Image: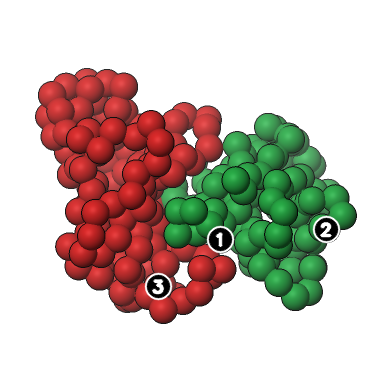
């Protein structure tokens, strides 16, 4: 079954520094991959998605992610982090057996320091 | 953009009460909606797939009689937590994919319902 792993539970970066959040997937074929962001007590906002084509995808809020089949990864990046980026970030993969519901990673909590 | 409205946003009730949560797609029709549950500091876990006009498909370990799902129209799915107990306290989130869009297209999420059972 399709699954994703987010190795980092917490990450702390300084405002203005670059950011990379890791996501590894498990699936034989090309997966449908997504990154979502969740602010405390809120729902989920889609940052970006990948299902085919260009392996470097651009998202909202200055985020991008690169699909690397050789590494089974779909890491999220941002060149310069803003304090408002502090939130919980979830990587997710579409699951074929349940009508392409999403299987989420455990999330990475991002803290941004001044 | 596509909007999914979830109501109520927060509910506090006594043990033994049944609670209904609504998920509405406001500007699109959705043949399929999904219900997720999120424990504190945890990821979202798929509970069930709600199909318009047919029975919901539940994930393994989710009690069908405890979590009743009804998808009576193309814009509304409801989750009823029956005879709720403190262990049912959680954050419940629904999502929907516009009808006709491919399965690679993203779902649109509601803002979630915080359920607290006393």
Chain B image colour = red
Q: Would you call the spot at circle 2 few (<14 residues within 10 Å), some (14-19), or many (20 or more)?
A: few
Taking A40 as reference, is B67 left or right? Answer: left
**Quarter containing the C terminus of chain A:** top right
Instruction: For marks 1 and 3, give the one nearer the viewer.
Output: 3
Q: Residues within 10 Å of mark 3 (few under 14, many from 20)?
A: many
Read off the chain for label 1: A
The foreground one among B71 and B25 is: B71
Whether B59 is drawn above or below B108: the answer is above
Q: Colour of chain A?
A: green
Separation of residues labelled 2 and 3 (CA atoms): 29 Å
Asked if residue B20 is positioned above or below residue B61 in the image, the reply reads: below
Q: Nearer the viewer, residue A7 or A99?
A: A99
Residue located beneath label 1 in the image: A46
Spatial separation of the CA atoms under disc 1 and disc 3: 15 Å
Q: Secondary structure at mark 2?
A: strand
Query: Are dots 1 and 3 in contact, CB under 8 Å?
Result: no
Horizontal and vertical percent position of residue A46: 56, 61
Q: Chain of mark 3?
A: B
Q: Which mark is residue A68?
A: 2
Distance between mark 2 and mark 1 Cα atoms: 20 Å
Q: Position of residue A66 (x, y in %)?
A: 79, 61
Chain letter of disc 2? A
Image height check: is A89 above or below B14? below
Residue placed under numbered mark 3 in the picture:
B98
Between discs 2 and 1, the one toward the N terminus: 1
As drawn, B46 above or below A101: above
Q: Could you tell me which residue is drawn at 69 percent across and 51 percent down?
A: A27
């Amino acid at each position: 079954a399709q699954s994703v792993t987010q190795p980092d539970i917490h990450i702390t970066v300084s405002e203005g520094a670059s950011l990379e959040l890791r996501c590894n997937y498990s699936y034989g074929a090309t997966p449908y991959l997504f990154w979502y962001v969740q602010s405390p007590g809120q729902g989920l906002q889609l940052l970006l998605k990948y299902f085919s084509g260009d392996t470097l995808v651009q998202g909202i809020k200055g985020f991008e992610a690169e699909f690397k089949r050789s590494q089974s990864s779909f890491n999220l990046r941002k060149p310069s982090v803003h304090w408002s980026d502090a939130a919980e970030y979830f990587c997710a993969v579409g699951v074929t057996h349940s009508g392409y519901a999403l299987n989420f990673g455990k999330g990475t909590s991002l803290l941004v320091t001044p | 953009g596509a909007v999914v409205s979830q109501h109520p946003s927060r509910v506090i009730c006594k043990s033994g009460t049944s609670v209904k949560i609504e998920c509405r797609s406001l500007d699109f029709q959705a043949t399929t909606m999904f219900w997720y549950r999120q424990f504190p500091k945890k990821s979202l876990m798929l509970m069930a797939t709600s199909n318009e006009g047919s029975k919901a498909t539940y994930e393994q370990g989710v009690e069908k009689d405890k979590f009743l799902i009804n998808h009576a129209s193309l814009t509304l799915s409801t989750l009823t937590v029956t005879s709720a107990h403190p262990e049912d306290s959680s954050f419940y989130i629904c999502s929907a994919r516009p009808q006709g869009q491919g399965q690679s297209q993203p779902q649109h999420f509601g803002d979630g319902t915080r359920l607290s059972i006393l």
